Amino acid sequence: MIKRIEENEKRLDRLLESVKDLEQALENFKSKKKDLKELKKYYGSKKWLKDKEAYEQNKIPKIKAGVLSEDAVWNLLENIDELKKEMNAIKKDLK
């Protein structure tokens, strides 16, 4: 009986820590919603295409410009979609 209580107490502790970490991660992500909306608006826009062309033609200095690659933003958006699917699957599993 004591062993069972101790094992479940450890489970509780691990889950509490995990939920705390998840809450912090979600709060951090939610605080970036405006950034995500603005990035999605910029990606593929006329301004993005103009910036990409200027960068590729060396009309602007070489700066960190991963946002002008086609893969960086696309991969980010795909990762977010995958995380949403995972969260929905977890939600279903927990019912």
Image: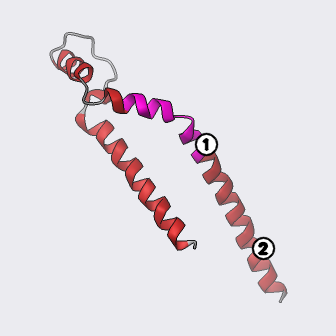
Q: Quadrant of the N terminus?
A: bottom right
> Residue 72, image x and y in percent?
31, 37
Q: Secondary structure at mark 1?
A: helix
Q: Which mark is residue 38?
A: none
Extent of the magenta region = 26-39
> Residue 23, image x and y in percent?
64, 50
Q: Does residue 18 appear to the left or right of 32 in the view shown?
A: right
Front-most of 2 and 35? 35
Q: Name the residue that disc number 1 marks.
A: 27
Q: Residues within 10 Å of mark 1 (few under 14, many from 20)?
A: few
Q: Secondary structure at mark 2?
A: helix
* Image point (69%, 58%), residue name: 17
* Image point (38%, 51%), residue name: 81
- The amino acid beneath tag 2 is Glu
Front-most of 37 and 14? 37
* Image point (74%, 72%), residue name: 10
Q: Does residue 45 appear to the left or right of 89 in the view shown?
A: left
> Residue 70, image x and y in percent?
23, 35
Q: Do the numbered discs 2 and 1 sit on residues whose CB atoms are within 8 Å?
A: no
Q: Name the residue that disc number 2 marks.
A: 9
Magenta span dominant secondary structure: helix
Q: Looking at the picture, does residue 86 appear above or below residue 48?
A: below
> Which color mode does the image show?
secondary structure
Q: How many marks?
A: 2
Decide whether residue 45 is among the magenta residues. no
Q: Looking at the picture, does residue 2 appear above or below residue 95?
A: below
Mark 2 or mark 1: name the one nearer the start of the chain: 2
